[in-house]
Image (cartoon, rainbow, N blue to C red):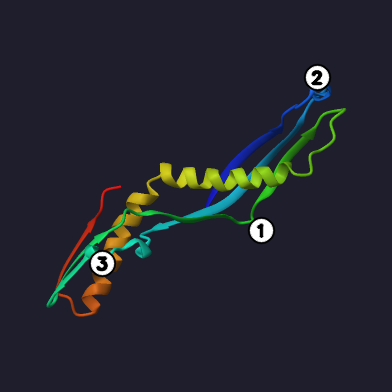
Amino acid sequence: MVQVHVPITDEPAGLWDRVKALFGTDELLLVATGEAIAGFDLQKLRPQDISVAGDSVVISLPPAQILYTRVDNKETYVYSRRTGLLWKPDKDLETVARRDAETKVQEWALEHGILDRAEKNGEVFLERFLRSLGFTDVTLTIRPQ
C-alpha cells in the first residue's frame, strides 16, 4: 500500500467564475491510500511462446504490466477543503480527486520499479511451479515490448 496526496482546484470556467475566483476557489486535498499489482498477463501467451521437449520447457513470457490499481476508500480521506466566499462547492470535486489518486498510485508504482520486481518475482514463481510439474530444465525469457 502506498499513500499519495492529490491537490485539486475547481478551475473557473466562465466570466462570472473568474470574478468569483478573486475571492477564492474550491480547493481540496485528498490523502489517498492505494495499491498497484503487476505481473505477467498469461492470457497473452501464444502457442509459439511455449516449447516442450521431454522434461524441458522454454517459455517466452509477455512483458510484465500493471494488472490493476485501486484506491482503498476506507483509508482515503479529504485532508482539507477550502471554498471561496462566493464559490459553491463542487459536489464532484472529490470524485475527480479519487480518480486522479488511482493514476498517481500507478505512477508512483512505476517510478519505484514495480515492473522490474514483478518480472523477477514472476520468473521465480513460474520456474518453481514448472519444476513442481516435473520439468527439470526450465528456460524463461521475456519478450521485448
Badge 3 marks a residue whose secondary structure is: helix
The amino acid type, in three-letter code, at marker 1 is Lys
Residue 64 placed where, x, y %?
Answer: 35, 54
Which of the labelled discs sits on residue 22, or is there none?
Answer: 2
Res 14 → quadrant: top right
Q: Residues within 10 Å of mark 1 (few under 14, many from 20)?
A: few
- As displayed, is residue 73 above or below residue 126? above
Of all residues shown, which one is farthest toward the right? 86
Residue 135 placed where, x, y %?
Answer: 17, 76
The amino acid type, in three-letter code, at marker 3 is Pro
Q: Nearer the viewer, mark 3 or mark 2?
A: 3
Judging by the rendered image, the residue that carries numbered circle 3 is 47
Q: Residues within 10 Å of mark 3 (few under 14, many from 20)?
A: few
The amino acid type, in three-letter code, at marker 2 is Leu
Label 3 or label 2, whichever comes before in sequence order: 2
Q: Is 52 in front, or is 130?
A: 52
